[in-house]
Image (cartoon, grey):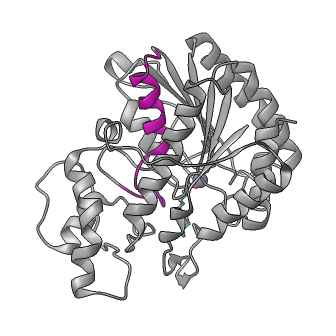
Amino acid sequence: MITVFSEHHRQHAARGEWHEGAFREPFEAPARADGVLEAVRQAGLGPLVAARRSGLGVVERVHSAAYLAFLEQIHADWAVVYPDEDAVPYAIRAGTQGPVPDGLFGRLGHYATDTVTPITAGTWSAACAAVDCALTAVAEVAEGASEAFALCRPPGHHASRERYGGYCYLNNAAIAAESWRQRGCERVAILDVDYHHGNGTQSIFYDRPDVLFVSLHADPRHAFPYFEGYAAEAGAGAGEGFTLNLPLPPGTTWEAYTPALERALDRIVAFGAEALVVSLGLDTYGGDPIADFRLTERDFGELGARLRRVAAPTVFVLEGGYAVEELGPNVVAVLRGG
Ligand code: OKP
Ligand code: ZN
């Protein structure tokens, strides 16, 4: 198993996060990716490959030009006024229609979906480096490796065509899927096993039949992102039937998880996926500080083993997972597969 990483992820380090009424250290921190790289190295999982710089070509098929220009520029504009703080909006656009306001807070609130996703001086560089990891992993598999792991940070699955949120800025998994399409794969499946619904990924492919989106996640009635991820969301237009949401209740254990996982895998096999992108979130772990599922390291091994049933070239893209000590071992368990 090839692991693709980048040191540039450390350029994205938020000052803190408002959580349950208090400002605290951010959950989504550089130590996450450092710990995963160390665990992969120690486990002797396979070659470690530095991400190669990719152009914005595929990225521009997933995100709008105006959004990308905003992400690249906003912190520089912000720092003129607030040099020591992360850029965070307080008013958030509720719908999707309407002009982009001119000022800092108007622009931030236009493109953001929440207030827990700060933009720092290094956010754009780090987000681009995460995309580089994903695209290099696709390239490695396209060139003959059967699987690769993209050690992406920041994560991506909450980022939509032109909104950021949920610690995500550029949608690494969607960009990986689009890269497969560009390389001639007719049918690409995305399996999202992060605890949180991948609402950004879902929205990007919602009306398309060529990229199947299947997600197992905490029921949005109780969990972030709250407003998307319901079972009734099944795709639209030509994409109807090509989104499958399998929400699960609070406290879900491996016993309750497996029937949904088998349904997800059945759908992907029936679809005839020529390539698989796994949005690999490990925040379904029992010890995760912001989630309430009960999976164990052993369960992650079993998850990894069952995923191989798809038998298609596979790219694993790191999403969430906030129990920093156990994140690396849990990732290794999935990648090893049992
Ligand atoms: C990103 B990914 C509020 C709790 C966290 C945001 C969750 C973002 C999850 N302080 N709310 O899907 O792991
Ligand atoms: Zn998550």
The residue lying toward the viewer, choosing from 320 and 59, is: 59
Instruction: Give the residue displayed 67% in from the left and 17% down from the top.
Output: 266
37 on left or right of 7:
right
Q: Is residue 94 visible?
A: yes
Quarter holding the C terminus is: top right
Expressed as whole percent of the image width and height from the top left, the position of residue 273 reads 57, 16
Instruction: Give the residue displayed 25% in from the left and 78% down from the top.
Output: 78
Expressed as whole percent of the image width and height from the top left, the position of residue 221 reads 54, 49
* Above or below for 303 versus 211: below
The residue lying toward the viewer, choosing from 334 and 92, is: 334
Does the magenta-highlighted stretch encompass residue 213? no
* Above or below for 304 versus 22: above
Does the magenta-highlighted stretch encompass residue 168? yes
Q: Where is residue 64, by image quadrant?
A: top left
Expressed as whole percent of the image width and height from the top left, the position of residue 305 reads 81, 30
The residue lying toward the viewer, choosing from 198 and 3, is: 3
Quarter holding the N terminus is: top right
Instruction: Give the residue displayed 45% in from the left and 37% down from the top.
Output: 174
* Above or below for 33 versus 237: below
Q: Where is residue 59, by image quadrant?
A: top left
Magenta segment: 164-185
Instruction: Give the residue displayed 14% in from the left and 58% down from the top.
Output: 100
Expressed as whole percent of the image width and height from the top left, the position of residue 83 reads 31, 87
2 on left or right of 168:
right
* Above or below for 23 versus 156: below
Q: Is residue 290 visible?
A: no
146 on left or right of 133:
right
All told, the count of numbered labels is 0
Q: Where is residue 285, by image quadrant?
A: bottom right
